[in-house]
Amino acid sequence: MIQTNVLDQPNPRMTIYFGSTTTPECFFSKDVTQGDDVVQPHPVLAVRVGERVTLQCFCPNDDMEYTFWLKLNVGQIPLLIATSLKFSSDAMFYNNFNSTRFQVKTGVGLNHLTISNIESSDSAMYYCGMRKDYSIVFGAGTY
């Protein structure tokens, strides 16, 4: 296994590889192939309370099995917001994100999360990810 300091990389992404059913291996890698890239083009978005925002995520790899969104607040565990299967237009919502304020738009190569009527508690880092084969690849995040 090659080790590298991801903080020295210009645009790190986290990839989790599952080596077996009993012993998952987890490491950071900047060497994700272009086809596996998950692109969140806006690292920071400024939005006022009450407004609406769309967090963009592009997954140009057609081999993905499903995509998902996570919310991460500093000092807390990540919360799963929603998952979307490759051939489904409907997202499954989790952890009290199933209100009408949260919508996921999926299509070929995209997985966008829209949050309406922004609340101050929505301020967090949001990660888009995808699963392909035995790996999970995350974008760089949007705050």
Image (cartoon, rainbow, N blue to C red):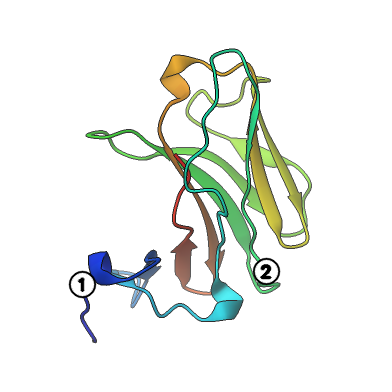
Left or right: 38 as drawn, with respect to 12:
right
Quadrant where the image shows the N terminus: bottom left
Residue 53 position (above or below residue 113): above
Residue 48 position (above or below residue 132): above
Rendered location of residue 20, percent (x, y): 34, 76
Residue marked by disc 1: 5
Question: Which of 23/17 is in front?
Answer: 17
Rendered location of residue 89, percent (x, y): 79, 47
Instruction: Report whether residue 26 is seen.
Output: no
Mark 1 neighbour class, 10 Å CA radius: few under 14, some 14 to 19, many 20 or more: few
Question: Which of 118/101 is in front?
Answer: 118
| Amino acid type, mark 1 | Asn
Residue 100 shows which numbered tag? none
Left or right: 67 as drawn, with respect to 124:
right
Instruction: Report whether residue 130 is seen.
Output: yes
Left or right: 141 as drawn, with respect to 1:
right
Residue marked by disc 2: 60
